[in-house]
Image (cartoon, helix red, strand yellow):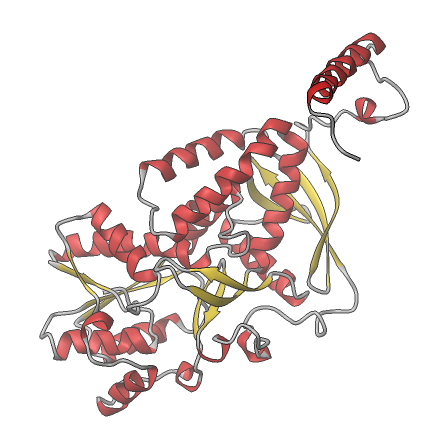
Amino acid sequence: MAYSGGLDTTAALHWLKRVRGMKVVALALNIGQGGDFDEVAERAIDAGADSVHAIDRRRTFVKQYCFKALKASARYENSYYLSAALSRPLIATELVALAREESARYVAHGAPPKGNDQFRFECAVAALEPDLEMIAPMREWDLSTRGDVLEYLKKNRLPIGAEAARNYSSDRNIWGVRSSAGELEDPNEPAPPYIYQITNSAEKAPNEPEELEIKFHQGEPVAINGKRYQAVELVEELQRVAGLHGVGRVDTVEDRILGFKSREVYEAPAAHVLQVAHDELEKLTLDAEFVEFKPMLSARYAKLVYDSQWFTKLRESMDAFFRESQQYVTGTVKLKLFKGAVHVLGRNSEFSIYDREASRRHQLGGIPAASVAGYLELRRLNQMTHSFKQRPKF
């Protein structure tokens, strides 16, 4: 069973053990969600798990999932950096591997019956190991509200964490935080300040800006201000710095898999800074055709991730496309963080296709005047042909 340590998975684990009479092997992955990871494993045992596998997969998550989305410039509906959605195929992969090791017949999760994650878990498991049967306790039991789940936990003397005091739902990992439901259900009401976990408000951010220089190698960030970092440490450092300056907050209404809309609040300070810098470096090193074409693929890639289609030939093929496109996306980008905003100050690459001479508008810079005149004449002829038959009104 995929176990997060939250209220729902704790109740679901106990329900599988006591009501369904199953042996339960809990899988707890550290993907940068913060808190005491050992405490999560202990809570699983307290809830009735026969054994717990607690594994650190932060590096795998960042390198094999987050950085792929970064290269693809993937944001669902141009807002969400897919922090939770990207983690589900990784969790499913580990679930299937553990199920094989344990010779298990079933895999379980604690996703709610109207949420997106049930699709992500179950579609991923079906792709990886179709013989495994899925169990979704929250679709089977008669606990219909959060209050019912809390009452179940109390009745069975199960561990209840600090989240019991809140009404909203939250999911956090190293790539960002997703919050929804509860006090966030009215899209006309501002999100309460306590919703935000890793970012300051613009009002509480420092009054002095901070400048950063991020170095990329073939589309992946490798250094900050000249200091090289491993992938996990780099993202953690950017999350700290950008979060301090209030960067990466998004309050949006999005379209869920089941078709209804949901008000979501996201925090993704590191992801936002890296995406701004990465996209700016692409503009310097990739040609106009690619820059114009990529947004269509980025939107499709984001929808694949969001809609539980990670394990598809289309996603794999798109990754190959983006991987090839990053061959020359190497260089540095200078940024300024200030009061929730990211400003680009400069960019540099040994593979830059920016031609300073050609960009000077008041001189030809090596382009023969006859060539410019000829190109211009072709453009004029195109407009004249249309005008003779379909003259615009003015």
- The relative height of residue 4 versus residue 75 in the rendered view (above or below) is below
Residue at point 24% right, 86% down?
152
Which residue is at the far right? Answer: 362
Q: Nearer the viewer, residue 74 or 220?
A: 74
Q: On the image, which quarter does residue 209 sit in? A: bottom right
Q: What is the x, y in percent for residue 200?
A: 64, 71
Count of numbered tags: 0
Q: Nearer the viewer, residue 287 or 338?
A: 287
Residue at point 39% right, 46% down?
304
**Residue 138 appears in the figure:** yes
Which residue is at the far left? Answer: 21
Q: What is the x, y in percent for residue 100?
A: 16, 52
Q: What is the x, y in percent for residue 38?
A: 35, 72
The quarter of the picture where the C terminus appears is top right
* Left-right relation of 136 to 224: left
The quarter of the picture where the N terminus appears is bottom left
Q: What is the x, y in percent for residue 172?
A: 45, 66
Which residue is at the far top? Answer: 370
* Left-right relation of 285 to 310: right
- The relative height of residue 65 versus residue 260 in the rendered view (above or below) is above
Residue at point 60% right, 27% down?
289
* Left-right relation of 394 to 311: right
- The relative height of residue 233 versus residue 16 in the rendered view (above or below) is above
* Left-right relation of 161 to 235: left
**Residue 42 appears in the figure:** no
Q: Nearer the viewer, residue 175 or 151?
A: 151
- The relative height of residue 201 versus residue 107 in the rendered view (above or below) is below
